[in-house]
Amino acid sequence: MAKIKVLLPQFGMGMQDGEIVRWLKVVGDRVEAGETLLEVEAAKSAVEVPSPGSGTLTEILVEEGETVDVRTHIATLET
């Protein structure tokens, strides 16, 4: 099985980090590419983060309420 890293995307040129507001999926859930995985707050606005691929969410590395830099590995999917 292949692993897919879920990275915190950069939603704008000035965005350097984001706070994980809410995970919409839990470890063990099946997700499809493009399906919303979580909500992130960046620059005072909430943004939905889509899944980069289809598979099973196998780990969440950043918990709700934590702030991390753009391109940080925040979760892993297995195909």
Image (cartoon, helix red, strand yellow):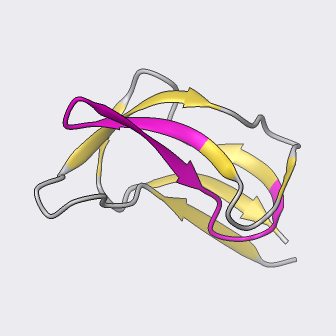
Q: Is residue 58 magenta?
A: no
Write the residue at 65% across / 46% down.
37
Name the residue: 74% across, 37% down: 25
Quadrant of the drawing holding the N terminus:
bottom right
Measured from the top left, where is residue 22 in percent x and y? 55, 27
Where residue 65 sits, quadrant-wise, is: top left
| Residue 49 within the segment the image draws in magenta | yes
Is residue 52 found left or right of 8 in the rendered image? Answer: right
Q: What stretch is highlighted in magenta?
A: 38-56
- Residue 47's image quarter? top left
- Residue 73 image position (x, y, % from top left): 47, 57
Q: Main secondary structure of the magenta part?
A: strand
Q: Residue at x 30, y 58 (%)?
A: 11
Task: Give the side of residue 44 with respect to residue 79, left or right.
Answer: left
36 is higher (above) or lower (below) than 73:
above
What x and y, as percent, mark residue 6? 56, 60
Residue drawn at (74%, 61%), measured in percent from left and top? 77
Whether residue 27 sits left or right of residue 16 in the image: it is right
Could you tell whether 17 is left or right of 76 in the image?
Answer: left
Q: Residue 26, how many percent across, how many down? A: 77, 34
